[in-house]
Structures are given as structure tokens and as C-alpha cells.
Image: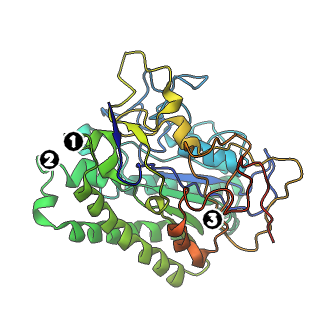
Amino acid sequence: MTFVAKQWVFLPVVGVVILFLQPFALGNPQVPCYFIFGDSQDDNGNNNYLNTTAKANYPPYGIDLPEGPTGRFTNGRNQADFIAELLGFEGYMPPFANIKGQDITKGVNYASAASGILDQTGRQLGDIVSLNQQLQNHRRVTSQLVRLIGNEAATKEYLAKCLYTFAIGSNDYIDSYLLPEYYPTSRLRTPRQFARMLIIEYSQQLRKLYRLGARKIAIFGLGFLGCVPGLLSIDGTCVDSLNSEVQLFNEELKPLVDELNTELSGAHFIYVNVTAITLSTMPAVSAGQCNPGQIPCSSRNQYYFWDDFHPSEICTSALPLRWSSPGCRNPRVSDLHLVVLPANTRLWVLRRDSIILLKLGLDDLDGIGNFHLKNNGPAALGFDEDLHACPEWT
């Protein structure tokens, strides 16, 4: 069974943030370290040993990974993995749960499935690591880094050069606000009041990270939860009311990012507007591809979703995996710029060495809302139809 979204299909990682701070080369990362905060979209094993049903350390999860199931909620690599690759890291950031003996100077993944901005979120599933707890774990890591680097001032200078990503908030709706049988929030607050409550808490959490030395922080907005297979209406269509509620959160998040950049000295917060990148109408599965203990479909690279809530590796990859093409030169960037790599679509065949770049300054971030693959495709961006040409950067 398939469904067709009215105008778009929910792609939680259709926008990938990369900061081109220096010429790209594998093994020569563009930032010294990368820290990940989030939920199952980025979890790579932090929930494996917790007393919770929110874990993915069993087949067929990880079927396309050499090591098999790792705790990632997909068939292969997740969003954090691809960002690490595109930044130039040779390996992936270790989950906080397994950092003993690991090189934490390159970063840590704190993401925990079912977690949210609120401490209560996801608790009906068992133990999870909320965003507040993830920040506490990061404080412990920064303390270890002080001992490794030698002094606090040098450590803060080091951490200021790192990249931090936040992709969280979906579960505050899925595993909290939309579960009145477990949480009374939806009876006590309107959708807008709930969105504002999340933003107030989120603001405090982001400021806490800033005090720990973070300066380059990318914050992903929420996608259209009403079009996730597990939340579709009975007739297989998107739930517009849920999408509207999520948009209230995104509308509150944008001015928060502006506020943080204004008030916090040296801060570079950027907002990744996931829902603003639209795709032409296309089919997507309405039932998950991952059933515990069963053999998944062999054509999983043709589907956006791996299970009822999580994208497949092919969707997450957003093609490509590397910045390389003879004769192409890297963009010269004097400040932070957002690089958006649209996920694989049926409009054009995207090869693994092809790349679409939108050069956006921090002040032009909302410009992404005008990008539509159908109307603003390769030709409009200065690419050949097959996406082999290199853009000219000045």
C-alpha cells in the first residue's frame, strides 16, 4: 500500500548542514570535533543497554551495515553518520554509552531514541536520555577534555571551533502531547501554548550548551509528522492538523535562533528549515519496512521510510557522500554558510559524486523556503541536467 502526499513527503533529513570552513579532504575534518544531540534520528547505540523498548539493536536494523545492528534506527547509516562523513571525519562519533577508551576529542553522539526537549517525553517506553540528561553528559565530557587538553581556557577555545547539531522535538509530540492516556499536557495547553512551552525549555538548554563553550550550533526544525507512515490517517493520507501543530513549534523556533545570535556573544546558531524544502508529489510506503525477526524487503533503497517512523539510509544519505569532482574547486567562505543537499528524488538521477549546493549566509536562511526541486532544479542552480557540472563560487 502506498500513499501520496498532497505536495510533499516527510523527509526528516532532507536538509543537511555542513560548515565549509576550510578545503575539504577526507581525514582532514573541517571542524576539530562534532557533537550530536537528538533522538532516534541520530541515536547510534545510546539506548542499547537501557531498560526501554525504544532500541534498535536487533535485526533487521543495521542490515546494510558491515557490523550489523548497532542501535541505529535504520537499515544503514543515519543522519549524524553522513554529516560526519561530509565534514571529513574518517570515523563516526561514538555513542556516549560507549566512550570508555574512545577518542572523545573528535566528538560524541549523545542522541537517545524517544527522547525530547521535555524530561517526561518517552518515559512510557522505559528509560531514555532526555535532552537535559544529554547536556549533563556533555558537561562530563567537557570536564574530561579539560584534563586531556590541560586547562579550561584552551578547552573552551577548542570547543568553540566544533560543530554541534540538534535534531529533537518530534517525540515531544509523538510520545507526549499526543498521548493523553499517559500525559495530561494536551488537556492543559493548546497547541500554541505547548509549542511555546517547548521553546522556553529549549532556549534554556541551548544557553546551557553555550556556557559550556559551544559556538557553532545547527538546529533542525521539525518535519511534517502528519505524513509519517505510523501517524497517517485511516485512509492513508497525511494528518493536516498534526502538521499544523508542528509548524507552530517551527514558527517559534525561528525567532529563538535570532534571539540567541543577538544576545550571545560570538554565537553562530543556524536554523535548518526542513519543511521549507518541498518535493514534487511522489509515492512513499504507508507501512514500515522493518518488522522484528522478519526479512525486510530487498528493494529498500526505493523507499523513503525504513520503518513506521524512520527514514531509510538512501533517504538519509541525501546523496552524495563526498565532495570530489575533477576540476571543481571548494567554495571560499568567509563566514558560516548552509549547504543543503536534497535527498534522492525521482526527478533526476543523482549520482554519488553529485552535489547540489545552496549558498546561504546566516542572514539569508529563510531563503531556503523558496527552493522547490521541480521549479528550481539543476539548471536554475547552474548545474547540467545530470548534475555533473560544478558551481562557480566567488
Q: Look at 67% across and 50% down and name the residue there.
A: 105
- Amino acid type for the residue under numbered disc 2: Tyr
Q: Which mark is residue 258?
A: none
Query: Could you tell me if the residues under marks 3 and 1 are in contact, i.e. CB atoms within 8 Å?
Result: no
Whether the residues at callouts 1 and 2 have beta carbons within 8 Å, the answer is yes
Q: Earlier in the sequence, mark 1 or mark 2?
A: 1
Checking the image for residue 338, the label placed there is 3
Asked whether 89 or 222 is in front, the reply is: 222
User: Quick one: SS at disc 2?
Assistant: loop
Discs 3/2, front: 3
Q: Please state if 302 lies on the left or on the right of 310 as rendered.
A: right
Residue 24 x, y percent position in the rendering = 79, 53
Write the residue at 42% across / 22% down.
58
Residue under numbered circle 2: 182
**Amino acid type, callout 3:** Leu
Q: Give the left or right position of residue 40, taking residue 26 as reference.
A: left
Label 1 belongs to which residue? 124
Q: Determine the residue located farthest toward the bottom in the rendered image.
A: 262
